[in-house]
Amino acid sequence: MSLKHLGFIDLPAHLKAGGFDHAVIHPKSARLYVAHTANDSLDVIDCKNDHYLHSIPNLAGVAGALVSDEHELIFTSNRGENSVGIFRSSDEQGLIKIPCGIRPNGLAYDPKRSLLLAANVGDPAIPNSFTLSIIDVKKRAMIASIVVAGRTRWTAFDPVTDCFYVNIADPPQIVVLEAGGPMHISRIIPVPAAGPHGLDVDVEKRRLFCACDDGKLILLDADSGVVISSAEISGAPDVIFFNKKLDHLYVAIGDPGVIDVISTREMKLLERVPTEKGAHTIAFDPDRNKIYAFLPQTHRAGIYCDEG
């Protein structure tokens, strides 16, 4: 066994229908921020002691959370009000909101240029609403909106090439934007599986991991876009995280409610860990090799340690 279950953290009960979405850990403070979409808030967890601290309210339909370690910033995508939120880790009360595209979801950040990318889910009834918003964080303004071919999924930033990668569900592809000229798509990488969803980058070994709705994990060369290999996973995925210390990839799958642990050396399933039906999102603490799974039926977080 790889993942050892350590316990649970009780979180606030849902105030309306829904559950949790993306989560992120701020290493310096050892705080975890998870989008509690049902409550329009970020729940904050102390990862050193594994207990709930408080919630940050007034984030309508919050879906994404992202941290900039370099600038000590926390970002949120607020799908219910078409905005992104920004605050300093040391000043949660200093939250500001910047308008962006329709129903923002995935977030990625270029700290060198202070550019935030928000991948917008859009509205199928509104033409050209599948877009990428480029936000100048220093100017506190959206400076570009790029139309893409279909619904966006997760996104990542590669500091080696200064590029943003964004998954598109249909047609299945990864679009690439150069941070130095993010007003247009620089190239498109076809994905040979339906519904690209979870995305992460192995910066050192130049690999892209793309988890797809048809139960496949695709490994691509980050620079050329060439498919290297693939692996079967347990169902339609959402969030994925790469653990470079152990060469493990964690895949959150809401149905049936498991975390797949994949060996990225061999691209094979090591372990399937039960969580809870609908638990489609996780967070990864690289400093402690801990994974948090967010359980919507019991409004709590399951804690696991990867013992390798």
Image (cartoon, rainbow, N blue to C red):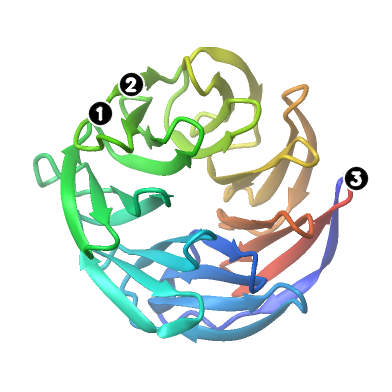
Q: Are marks 2 and 1 in contact (CB under 8 Å)?
A: yes
Q: Residue at x 16, y 45 (%)?
A: 145
Q: Give the label, 2 or 3, closer to the camera.
A: 2
Residue carrying label 3: 1
Which residue is nearer to you in this view: 276 or 176? 176
Q: Are marks 2 and 3 in contact (CB under 8 Å)?
A: no
Amino acid type, mark 3: Met
Vertically, is 182 above or below 112?
above
Q: Crowding near pointer 3: few (<14 within 10 Å), some, many (20+)? A: few
Q: Residue at x 78, y 55 (%)?
A: 289
Q: Position of residue 28 (x, y in %)?
A: 64, 69
Vertically, is 223 above or below 144?
above
156 left or right, relative to 139: right
Q: Position of residue 220 (x, y in %)?
A: 55, 20
Residue 173: image quadrant is top left
Distance Cα–Cα, label 3 vs label 1:
42 Å
Q: Position of residue 300 (x, y in %)?
A: 64, 74
> Is residue 121 visible in this depiction of the protein?
yes
Q: Crowding near pointer 1: few (<14 within 10 Å), some, many (20+)? A: some
SS class, disc 3 = loop
Vertically, is 176 above or below 125?
above
In the rendered structure, which disc, 3 or 1, sits on the residue that comes first in sequence?
A: 3
Residue carrying label 2: 188
Residue 185 is tagged as 1
195 left or right, relative to 101: right
SS class, disc 1 = loop
Amino acid type, mark 2: Ile
Q: Crowding near pointer 2: few (<14 within 10 Å), some, many (20+)? A: some
